[in-house]
Image: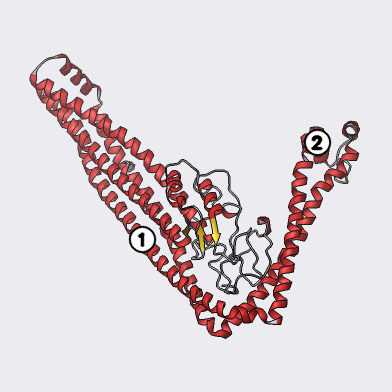
Amino acid sequence: MSIRGPEALASLDEAMRDIRREEEEISKRLARSAEKLGKIRENEAELFRQLAQLRLDPAVQGELDGAISSAETRAREQLKAHAKNLSKAEKDVAESDAALTRLTGERADALKVYEGHQAELKALGSRLGASIARDPAFAAKRQQASELADIAGQSMRKTEQAEQDREQKGKPYRDDALFMYLWEAGYGTASYRANNLIRYFDGMVASLVGFHKARPNFAMLNEIPLRLREHAERQIENARHAEAEVDALEMAAIDDAGGKPMREAMEAAQKQIDALDAEIVATEDRRDEAAKTLGMLSQGGDAAFEDALAGLATALGREDIQTLLAEARRTRTGQDDTIVAQIDDARARAKEEENETRELNDRLRTLAARRRELEDIQWEFKKQRFDDPRSSFRDDKLVGDVLNDFLRGGISAASYWDQWRRSQNWSAGTSDWGGGVGLPNNGRQRSNSPWPEGGGSTMNWPDASFGGGGSGKPRSKGGFGGGWGSGSGSGGGFSRPRTGSTGTRKHGGFKTGGGF
């Protein structure tokens, strides 16, 4: 089953809320664990005080009690301060979560408004399509743009073939270490620099590997793709310019027929969506910082708090206290045995809390990393306009089993995002690129034209032809921000801006001009 873009994004939003809820729950459990550990240490101190009263003379007992009480008092004071800081951090995270829920809801509402005006424009375009298509000036311009698109496609296919030849036919040259040594040294060119002795030996090497004959062939293998790509990019720019002219004619026809208010309403909705996206990014970053603070405090990472507990632990680990405990174990009295058993129980419970804390900390770090990866994916999803109402995905498992696999760490963020891109389609009958030419995006159908199906070029744009440029038109390949980067972790090749960035889309929003 397929799933529409807005519903797909809503599913990702729900997964994000689940991650944040689990983060919050774990932080609360860690906070309770830190508080419990502090109380266990206080209880252990009281037990040692009772043991000292039974076994030590008053002078020694007073000295020991003073050391324990001093450390205990400091720990109790820091526990209160720690609890206050923890409460503030929890409040900051909760406020950020509430803000994100509100912003996500507002964005969904704005997208519905956008979709409504989009449907109105499509209906108007359907009524006007036949008449505008018969206009000689429009037909001529569309034909010109279609021809230029075909030329651009042919040029890029030749470029890609030349680049494949460069990789395949150039491999024997690149694998020859002696040849590549001479090539990189610039041997046989004006850039070659070497003393007479080196020149003599390089000449012997050149004769040995046949460098003088091979060099022109290798140079041509490298040069031809560069020249072809320059030519192809010029042809693509010509096709884009022609497409823009067709867009302008379409827009003028729509405006003349009364569609301008609808188009302007779409643009206003798009501006609202862009503003909300920027605010969402900024709020996510604030929440990330607040979550880091909460996690640190929940784990007892407050320096003063740690010092206080460490001081109490040190006081309880004094040699005289350990001697007291050892002597109590050697003797068999009812009161001694009861207190020693309680001390052993307290230490066992403290160990359990420490082990659970380590496990929770590991889970919290995993959740934070997964949250940031999902934020990156959501950003790319919006930047590529996959949440456009005309966008859909063939595989609904992307919000089911595959999503769960990603959240469990079974697949990387890069792999998950690649599956989204490969599954994505635009509404049937039109290409996503806009304009009356119907320039397809690697075979995907154009979703924003108001004109009837048919007509226009059927050429499949090679992906390498459109490398950004702020057109607001999504690419079908490439990866995050033009490259996968080196890893699947957060930020590894993703283009989402982080703290300190502007937080706006890099490639524009939904297309509202021209073919709508």
Q: Amino acid at mark 2?
A: Tyr
Residue at the (71%, 71%) spot, across then down: 145
Q: Is residue 238 at least partly visible in the picture?
A: no
Instruction: Give the crowd class for mark 2: few <14, some 14-19, many >=20 residues within 10 Å.
Output: some
Residue at the (40%, 42%) spot, across then down: 365
Instruction: Give the crowd class for mark 1: few <14, some 14-19, many >=20 residues within 10 Å.
Output: some
Residue at the (31%, 56%) spot, across then down: 94
* Quadrant of res 229: bottom right
Q: Is residue 253 left or right of residue 146?
A: left
Residue 181, numbered label? 2
- Could you say whether the residue bearing mark 1 is in a helix, strand or loop? helix
Task: Residue under label 1, please give it.
Answer: 101
* Quadrant of res 305: top left
Q: Is residue 190 left or right of residue 139?
A: right
Quadrant where the C terminus is found in the figure: bottom right
Of residues 163 and 181, the one nearer the viewer is 163
Q: Is residue 391 at least partly visible in the picture?
A: yes
Q: Position of residue 191 (x, y in %)?
A: 85, 45
